Every structure is written in structure tokens, then in C-alpha cells.
Image (cartoon, helix red, strand yellow):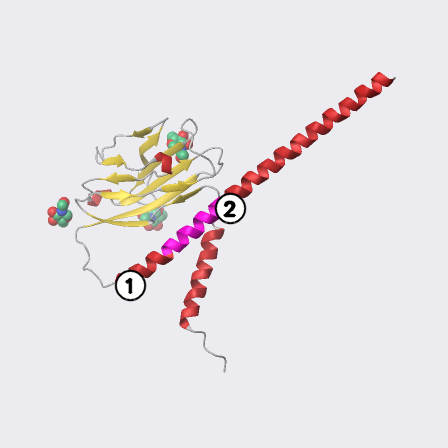
Amino acid sequence: MPRAFPSRSRAAVRWAALLVIAASSISAMDVLVAHQINALNGTMVRISCSFTSCYRLDHTKFAMNWTYQENSNDTEEMFMTFKNKIVPLRTERFGERVKFAGNLDKNDLSITISDVQITDEGIYNCYVRNPPDRIQGHGIIQLYVVTELPPPRDSTIAVAIGASVGGMLALVILSMVVVKCVRRHKKQELISDEQKMEEEGKTDGEGGTEEGTKQL
Ligand SMILES: *[C@@H]1O[C@H](CO)[C@@H](O)[C@H](O)[C@H]1NC(C)=O
Ligand SMILES: *[C@@H]1O[C@H](CO)[C@@H](O)[C@H](O)[C@H]1NC(C)=O
Ligand SMILES: *[C@@H]1O[C@H](CO)[C@@H](O)[C@H](O)[C@H]1NC(C)=O
């Protein structure tokens, strides 16, 4: 009878598979969000959105939009955008309760909603474009507003494990992004080297003919 696979290694294999999946889904431009946030009504909630990019943020080219939808079938209502700086768009729904709480220098586009209401429940979309990165980033966050906190569960160990695995995952993702960016830059250098060589070749050739004419 084959020996049973120890459950610990099975868990490790599962995590490794997850890491590979997470790592392979990374592109140069990526938006990182919590896909679901639960908030207590009346409190302030932070909706995080950050992105990775191979390029520094250029204020003249950068584009960002935050939109809200009651559900996935509804039209999106834009409540914040970027025109050389963050521009909050006053909406009836949020009034002045929405504020930008990120840091552009750190690729952080997070917002806060104060005095969060049940009617704020829905889908929050975070759109990013950071040229010359060609991919448009899109983060989707589902916000739930609860009127009562669930009773505390004893999940200290689960949280600790989750945090360490999450930290590891974040590290792996970060290193993948760095590797991708380095590769891309290398490729661009190679391309420009080839172009240079071609151009040099051309001038050499022209020089050759010039010499040839002189000799004639
Ligand atoms: C949250 O909602 C509950 C139920 O609707 C209400 O009783 C409570 O006063 C609300 N709390 C705040 C801070 O708005
Ligand atoms: C979206 O629309 C479809 C078709 O009209 C409907 O079946 C579905 O329940 C709707 N979804 C939501 C979340 O309202
Ligand atoms: C933001 O919205 C404006 C107006 O609809 C649109 O032109 C622009 O492409 C959007 N930008 C992003 C990054 O989604």
C-alpha cells in the first residue's frame, strides 16, 4: 500500500502551487487590492489600492479613476480622478466623505470613506494607467457594511500563519516584478544596441563608398 502523503507536505505543496499561480499571473503593471472589505457602519473605512509598474509615475501621463457601482450590472459612477493632481468629484452619494489617503510617490491610490453607510455597499473600481506601461490596471473591491461586528473568534494562530504566508507571497510577488522589470529593460537595451549597430554599419558602409569614390 502506498504511504499516505503527510498532510503537512500536502499543505506545503498546495502553497507552492499557489505561489506559482500567483507569480505567473504577474504582469509589469499590476493592481493590488483587498477583494473584499467589511466595514462597520458609522466608522471610517480605508479602501486600499496600489500598483506596481516598471516606470516612475509621471504626473503628465499618469491616469487614475475611482468609480462606484451598486452591483456589477450598474453603471459606474466616477467619484475621483487625476488631472495633474488628485481631483475628487463631488457626488451626491458620498458628499465630502470620500478622501484620497494614498501616496503617489509610493504608487498608493487608497481612499477613505468616513461615516460609512449601508448605502455605500457595492463595488469600488480603481483604474490606473502609468505610461509607458501599456497595460491598464483595474482593481475591484467589494465593500460590505455591517451594523454589528461579528463575535470575536479565536483565530490568533490562523491569523499568524496567514500573515507569514501572506508576507512570503508579497515578497515573491515583489521579486518577480523586479525580475520582470530588469528583463524588460535589458530587452530594450538589446534592441537599442542592435539599432546602434545597424546605424554604425550603415555609416561604415557609406564611409566605404565615399572612400571608394575618392579612390576613383
Ligand atoms: C448602524 O446601524 C444600526 C442599524 O441600522 C444603527 O442602529 C446604528 O445606530 C448605526 N450606527 C451608526 C454609528 O451609524
Ligand atoms: C445582473 O443582470 C442579470 C440579467 O439581467 C441578472 O440575472 C442578475 O441577477 C443581475 N445581477 C445582479 C447582481 O443584480
Ligand atoms: C478615466 O476616465 C476618463 C473619462 O471617462 C477616461 O477618459 C480615462 O481613460 C479613464 N482613465 C482610466 C485610467 O481609466
Callout 1 amino acid = Ile
Residue 46 falls within the magenta-colored stretch:
no
Ligand 3 location (quadrant): top left
Quarter of image, res 108: top left
**Image mark for residue 157:** 1
- Cα distance between the residues tagged 2 and 1: 33 Å
x and y percentages locating residue 10 in the rendered image = 43, 69
Give the residue at x 79% y 19%: 210
Highlighted magenta segment, given as a residue range: 166-178
Q: Main secondary structure of the magenta part?
A: helix
**Image mark for residue 58:** none
Q: Which residue is mark 2?
A: 179
How many numbered badges does the structure rendering display? 2
Q: Earlier in the sequence, mark 2 or mark 1?
A: 1
Q: Nearer the viewer, residue 154 or 179?
A: 179
Give the residue at x 46% y 48%: 175
Quarter of image, res 104: top left
Say if residue 140 shows up in the picture. yes
Callout 2 amino acid = Val
Residues tagged 2 and 1 counted as in contact (Cβ below 8 A):
no
x and y percentages locating residue 12 in the rendered image = 43, 65
- Secondary structure beneath dot 1 equals helix
x and y percentages locating residue 53 in the rendered image = 45, 39
Quadrant, the C terminus: top right
